Image (spheres, grey):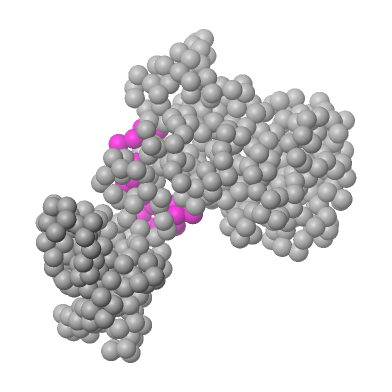
């Protein structure tokens, strides 16, 4: 299995073998973060730029740490402190950055397809770190890595995704990734937050959270995407918390060894209660830890691809 | 393509026995000694040496696995290798590390392995044991223990096969002669 793609734009692009190669490579890179000297020389001399037009704590830090642990040089650009505020277009920003010869540009943008535009016009590898409500491929990959690590497999699992499915790029990327495996996927949330096309992706819809979590191996919680208008799809946050917030009692209907995931940031007391977020079934912080390994693997594969 | 068996199963075993005795002689036993096999075939040879030492010294030495991919100097010039796990669960500080590989050629793999070890700690010593030394060094690195030396001629290739992965123990030379 060889990696040939220049860019990582969406999970929909990836084959099952490519997903497994990323996970296998990430398993090997994970150990580096546990060392006293957390650095290997693998990407010495490579330059990685993160270009974020939307706020981020985890994803950007995770990419930067991943690049640095592989000895690449990293430069971070936030839209708020860049020439974007002076009216520069995405294409011009991309072209100008490319003149400084970066090997990889990691972009997060509120516009779906923004990474694809850069990928078409630039020679650098482009990684999509989230484009609007479209996809967030590295999140789905680290989620699959975490599921495989905790469950020992992906095939045969029942996975429930609960929350604002409509506006969630994490849900979309995860559905595309998990459908490559023999999984049962259930989407749960208020009817207004379940997109009409979702069943065509091969998932089942269940509006009642108690029924949805029954015998679940994995529960993935999502936050309400306030920045994409998610809040106007529900009568009130309080009602949402009552009907779709994950509480400890829900877990009794799930499998005994269920794991609870969340891409973060979590809104405590809304989609997830404290006792679940901090409880024994939560793997939320493992997801963050695994994110670094997965992003190291992706940087390695993209920069070393067959040309 | 001509094929010649250079070492058979028995010869490989005898060679490893000799190397094991040399290791114990040079280190005056196996105090502080830890074994690290270089993926892929070095790992199986390391396991065999570990067993032989156990028979002689009645002591099971720590055994680690090293994947040198991340430290290669030709990483982006060759077909990208799959990175496999490094698994060294013991502290290498102040230990005598015996690196074990199947074939020694340019010395570049060993350079990478030494760099990888240095990132994991500061061993007291690093020694190197290989089953076959095929000459043609490109770096000033030499094994402390070598099973056999065979200077490869143009068009020849020397292959180490081990039953754990290849189903059969033998060292063969394939090529024009």
A176 left or right of B161 in image: right
Residue situated in front as seen by the camera: B137 or A118: B137
Q: Is residue B158 above or below residue A104?
A: below
Q: Nearer the viewer, residue A115 or A79?
A: A115
Horizontal and vertical percent position of residue B43: 34, 68
Question: Is B52 placed above or below A125 here?
Answer: below
Residue A121 showing in the rendered view: yes
Please indicate, yes or no, whether residue A219 appears anywhere in the rendered image: no
- State which quadrant residue A112 falls in: top right
Residue A107 percent location from the top left of the image: 51, 28
**Residue B24 image position (x, y, % from top left):** 21, 82
The residue that appears at 71% across and 25% down in the rendered structure is A228
Q: What residue span does the magenta drawing correspond to?
A: A27-48
What residue is at 64 percent from the left and 26 percent from the top? A132
Q: Quadrant of the C terminus of chain A?
A: top left
Spot occupied by residue A192 in the image (x, y as percentages of width and height): 84, 30
Q: Quadrant of residue B170?
A: bottom left
Q: Is residue A45 magenta?
A: yes
User: Is residue B75 inside the magenta stretch?
Assistant: no
């Amino acid at each position: 299995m060889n990696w040939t793609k220049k860019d990582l734009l969406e999970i929909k692009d990836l084959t099952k073998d490519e997903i497994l190669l990323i996970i296998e490579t990430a398993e090997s890179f994970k150990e580096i973060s546990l060392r006293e000297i957390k650095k290997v020389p693998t990407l010495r001399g490579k330059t990685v730029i993160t270009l974020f037009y939307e706020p981020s704590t985890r994803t950007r830090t995770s990419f930067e740490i991943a690049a640095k642990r592989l000895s690449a040089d990293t430069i971070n650009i936030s839209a708020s402190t860049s020439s974007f505020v002076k009216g520069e277009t995405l294409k011009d920003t991309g072209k100008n950055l490319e003149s400084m010869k970066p090997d990889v540009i990691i972009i997060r943008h509120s516009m779906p397809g923004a990474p694809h535009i850069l990928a078409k016009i630039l020679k650098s590898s482009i990684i999509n770190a989230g484009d609007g409500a479209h996809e967030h491929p590295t999140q789905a990959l680290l989620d699959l890595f975490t599921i495989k690590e905790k469950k020992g497999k992906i095939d045969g699992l029942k996975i429930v995704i609960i929350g604002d499915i409509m506006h969630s790029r994490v849900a979309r990327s995860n559905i595309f990734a998990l459908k490559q495996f023999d999984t049962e996927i259930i989407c749960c949330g208020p009817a207004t937050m379940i997109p009409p096309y979702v069943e065509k992706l091969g998932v089942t819809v269940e509006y009642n959270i108690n029924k949805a979590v029954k015998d679940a191996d994995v529960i993935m919680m999502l936050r309400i995407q306030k920045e994409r208008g998610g809040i106007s799809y529900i009568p009130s946050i309080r009602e949402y918390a009552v009907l779709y917030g994950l509480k400890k009692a829900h877990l009794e209907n799930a499998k005994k060894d269920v794991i609870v995931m969340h891409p973060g940031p979590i809104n405590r007391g809304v989609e997830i209660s404290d006792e679940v977020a901090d409880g024994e079934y939560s793997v939320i912080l493992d997801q963050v830890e695994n994110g670094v390994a997965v992003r190291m693997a992706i940087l390695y594969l993209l920069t070393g691809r067959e040309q | 393509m001509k094929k010649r068996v250079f070492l058979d199963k028995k010869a490989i075993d005898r060679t490893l026995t000799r190397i094991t005795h040399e290791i114990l002689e040079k280190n005056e036993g196996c105090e502080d000694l830890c074994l690290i096999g270089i993926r892929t075939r070095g790992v199986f040879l390391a396991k065999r040496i570990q067993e032989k030492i156990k028979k002689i010294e009645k002591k099971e030495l720590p055994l680690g696995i090293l994947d040198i991919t991340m430290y290669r100097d030709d990483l982006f010039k060759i077909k990208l290798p799959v990175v496999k796990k490094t698994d060294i669960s013991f502290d290498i500080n102040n230990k005598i590390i015996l690196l074990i590989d199947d074939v020694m050629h340019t010395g570049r793999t060993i350079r990478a392995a030494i760099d990888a070890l240095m990132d994991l700690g500061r061993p007291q010593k690093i020694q190197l044991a290989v089953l076959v030394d095929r000459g043609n060094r490109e770096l000033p690195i030499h094994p402390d223990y070598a099973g056999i030396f065979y200077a490869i001629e143009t068009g020849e290739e020397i292959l180490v096969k081990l039953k754990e992965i290849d189903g059969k123990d033998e060292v063969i030379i394939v090529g024009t002669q």
